[in-house]
Amino acid sequence: MTVLERSRLPLPLLRRGKVREVYEVDAEHLLLVASDRVSAFDIVMRESVPHKGAVLTQLSAFWFERLADVVPSHYVTADADRIVARVPALAASREQLAGRAMLVRRTAPVAFECVVRGYLSGSAWAEYQRQGTLAGEPLPPGLVESGRLPEPVFSPATKAESGHDENVPPSAVARALGSAVTAELRDRSFAVYAAGREHAERRGIIIADTKFEFGFDAAGTLRLIDELLTPDSSRFWPADRYQAGGPQPSFDKQPLRDYLALLRTEGRWSGDAPPPPLPPAVVEATSVRYLEAYRRLTGRDLDR
């Protein structure tokens, strides 16, 4: 599988994100194509990470299929042959589709990310250190970094057009969407997280936290959308190396973040665009992390 920096398909391009291109198929369907682009600190790097887009697509497809009985989703298929059969105009573009493309139902996305935290890490740990809360809601005293929370916490966040998303209390979601929709988002998020965490624990991976996105289809059904339980949307920690009380090794772009953080500490990068060039070793280490997460969670090697 060759590195794909960006796809170019004979379909109307709806939008191009940091990682994905979204194409219009028809009135009811979209096509998502995950490139190998990688971002860190809200900056897209010049270099791409081999196999990253395929991991995001194929791992999401694995979860959508496995958890289909837990919650309805927008997922139709990630099989390139089935996609081409549905959209014959893509026949000459099959190489770009293989392993990277997902046919999905159209939805109207909910304007909040539904984050579920099972462990105290990242921005949640930073807030807890400052004021003992998460998105303004109090947490029990005496918690430690990376410690398992007594119960998973529903911690929604705004979807920022630029910069960082912002944690908000569920009450802010309720004011915007109503209490019934907020309760449905919370309950479905907890259900998907519980099912995903149970499977991952059997595979030696801790899902410390993850974000879900939802949307309403034309019939008003709330569906899980976007990607699902991937290294880009979740913190995956190796269970055999877990030790509460500090940062944990993870199956994601941590080698990239660590390298960039070092450059910032040493004053060799300001943190703004343009990004610095990445050494091949950092790119390779990041690719290896993604592939290992896929292998552990699915029990098979990536279809390359």
Image: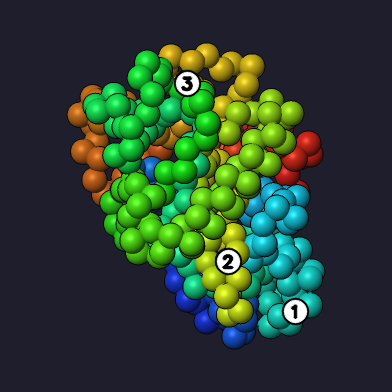
- Name the residue carrying label 3: 147
Residue 63 shown left or right of residue 13 in the figure = right
Q: Is any part of residue 121 visible from this angle? A: yes
The secondary structure type at the circle numbered 3 is loop
For disc 2, the neighbor class at 10 Å (few under 14, some 14 to 19, many from 20) is many
- Name the residue carrying label 2: 222
Label 2, label 3: how many angstroms apart (C-alpha)?
A: 32 Å
The amino acid sitting under disc 3 is Gly
Residue 261 shown left or right of residue 95 in the figure = left
| Residue sitting at x 37%, y 16% | 142
For disc 3, the neighbor class at 10 Å (few under 14, some 14 to 19, many from 20) is some
Residue 137 lies, in percent from the top left, at: 33, 37
Say whether disc 1 or disc 2 marks the residue closer to the N-terminus: 1
- Determine which quarter of the picture holds residue 71: bottom right
Label 3, label 1: how many angstroms apart (C-alpha)?
A: 47 Å
The amino acid sitting under disc 1 is Arg
Say whether disc 3 or disc 1 marks the residue closer to the N-terminus: 1
- Determine which quarter of the picture holds residue 267: top left
